[in-house]
Amino acid sequence: DSGVTQTPKHLITATGQRVTLRCSPRSGDLSVYWYQQSLDQGLQFLIQYYNGEERAKGNILERFSAQQFPDLHSELNLSSLELGDSALYFCASSASGGVVPDTQYFGPGTRLTVL
Amino acid sequence: AQSVTQPDIHITVSEGASLELRCNYSYGATPYLFWYVQSPGQGLQLLLKYFSGDTLVQGIKGFEAEFKRSQSSFNLRKPSVHWSDAAEYFCAVVAYSGTYKYIFGTGTRLKVLA
């Protein structure tokens, strides 16, 4: 158990809908990272937050957004969903904000299925 | 550009046999390297990491990896594979581009024959 929690574990929805994925980092970690894992794209970095502020952006679509709250949990919002958004979405946390290289600890993931 | 290559998409070994999973990286500065394992339906679990010092790194579950700067490699090894080692293995390098980011390889799926 990494100490990172994600809810829900599974999500099934329809095209055009909007969903919210939630992540709670390990106790004491200030950074949260979101990744998308699909069969054809592998593990893709989406976005990083550090202590409530956006720190880095990866291959995140404009239809997707995220935020980190004062209690450090984070939410990833996916809107106008398409079939191709079906994937595993992972959250990871680390102690630092990317100013030093450190270890990321991954949650169990949320499997999103768009029908 | 920074990248990580895992040349073997699938590897099959018999239980009890030795294992080596290959990882090559491309990064101009000092690399920080990781191996993660992902069991079916699970998240990624850290096996081991290399930041500096001894180039032979010991990890959990009996795994080790050796950093070879001259070959830009960080191969994962295990002397005797167990059936429970069947999983997908990811190599990652932490690269600096305004902030430190993980770059993952595409993974190697390990199958273990009884």
Image (cartoon, grey):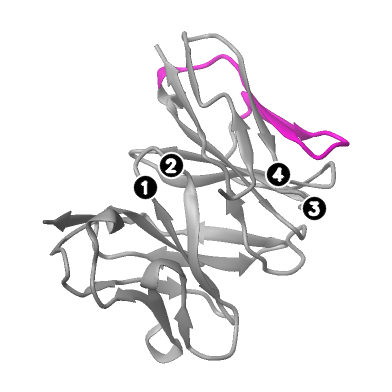
Distance, label 3 to label 2, CA atoms, is: 23 Å
Distance, label 4 to label 1, CA atoms, is: 21 Å
**The image quarter in which residue A47 lies:** top right
Helix, strand, or loop for circle 1? loop
Dot 4 amino acid type? Pro
Helix, strand, or loop for circle 2? loop
Residue that protrudes farthest toward the right in the picture: A70
Determine which of the numbered discs, if any, sits on residue B42 in the image.
2
Residue drawn at 74 percent across, 69 percent down? A100
Q: Which residue is mark 1?
A: B39
Helix, strand, or loop for circle 4? loop
* Residue B12 visible to an observer of this rendering: yes
Cβ atoms under marks 1 and 2 closer than 8 Å: yes
Q: Which residues are magenta?
A: A62-83
Report crowding for label 3: few under 14, some 14 to 19, many 20 or more residues within 10 A (C-alpha). Answer: few
Q: Which residue is mark 4?
A: A25
- The chain that hosts pointer 3 is A
Look at the image and tell me in which quarter the C terminus of chain B lies.
Answer: bottom left
Distance, label 1 to label 2, CA atoms, is: 5 Å
Distance, label 2 to label 4, CA atoms, is: 17 Å
- The chain that hosts pointer 2 is B
Residue drawn at 45 percent across, 88 percent down? B69
Q: Is residue A70 left or right of residue A5?
A: right
